[in-house]
Image (cartoon, rainbow, N blue to C red):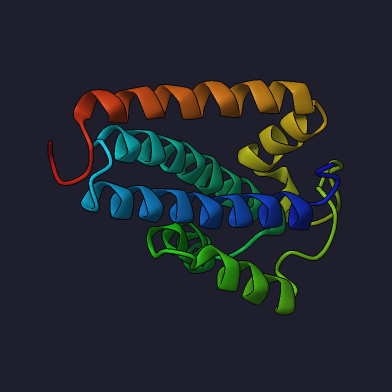
């Protein structure tokens, strides 16, 4: 399903935009009389997918060797409602999503960096990468839940 970085990034960019719709709809529903729990549920879904998108953006940025500015822009695009969609389109059109996962070391000196070796190890073991990402995202999600919602209660 996610044989290329392009495919994975596109799925998460669209999912993040969809969860903006869920959250905005929940806020409108609360404003017209729905119970506040709808925002809690919509916000929870959006928050989880936001973290998954951010983790995906970092992984793809490392694989595609984006500069730090592009990587930060990709992550920050999730803060603005629906901005992940034009971000994905721009990354695709500029060739920043082209290519496959870098599973093998090449003659490129950047492939010798410790984090490139670690990334390749995980990319060759997608089950281990999936477990790492899920555990990391869930842990961060729980910590953020304990801290409280953005803007306080």
Give the farthest residue toward the left. Answer: 153
Write the residue at 47% across / 68% down. Answer: 69
Name the image quarter holding residue 126.
top right
Foreground: 26 or 148? 26
Q: Image height check: is 81 above or below 141?
A: below
Q: Residue 25: percent from the left, percent from the top?
A: 39, 53
Foreground: 53 or 25? 25
Q: How many marks?
A: 0
Foreground: 37 or 111? 37
Q: Residue 75: percent from the left, percent from the top?
A: 47, 56
Write the residue at 44% across / 43% down. Answer: 46
Q: Residue 24: percent from the left, percent from the top?
A: 37, 55
Answer with left or right where residue 105 lies relative to residue 67: right
The N terminus - image quarter = top right
Write the residue at 67% across / 33% down. Answer: 118
Write the residue at 80% across / 65% down. Answer: 98
Name the image quarter holding residue 84.
bottom right
């Amino acid at each position: 399903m996610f044989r290329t970085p392009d495919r994975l990034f596109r799925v998460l960019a669209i999912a993040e935009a969809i969860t903006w719709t869920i959250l905005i709809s929940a806020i409108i529903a609360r404003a017209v009389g729905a119970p506040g729990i709808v925002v809690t549920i919509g916000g929870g879904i959006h928050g989880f997918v936001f973290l998954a998108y951010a983790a995906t953006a970092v992984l793809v940025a490392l694989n595609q060797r984006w500069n730090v500015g592009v990587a930060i822009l990709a992550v920050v695009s999730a803060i603005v409602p629906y901005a992940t969609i034009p971000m994905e389109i721009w990354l695709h059109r500029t060739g920043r999503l082209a290519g496959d996962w870098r599973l093998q070391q090449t003659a490129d000196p950047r492939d010798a960096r410790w984090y490139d070796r670690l990334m390749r190890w995980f990319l060759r073991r997608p089950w281990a990468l999936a477990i790492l990402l899920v555990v990391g995202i869930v842990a961060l999600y729980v910590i953020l839940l304990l801290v409280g919602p953005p803007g306080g209660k």
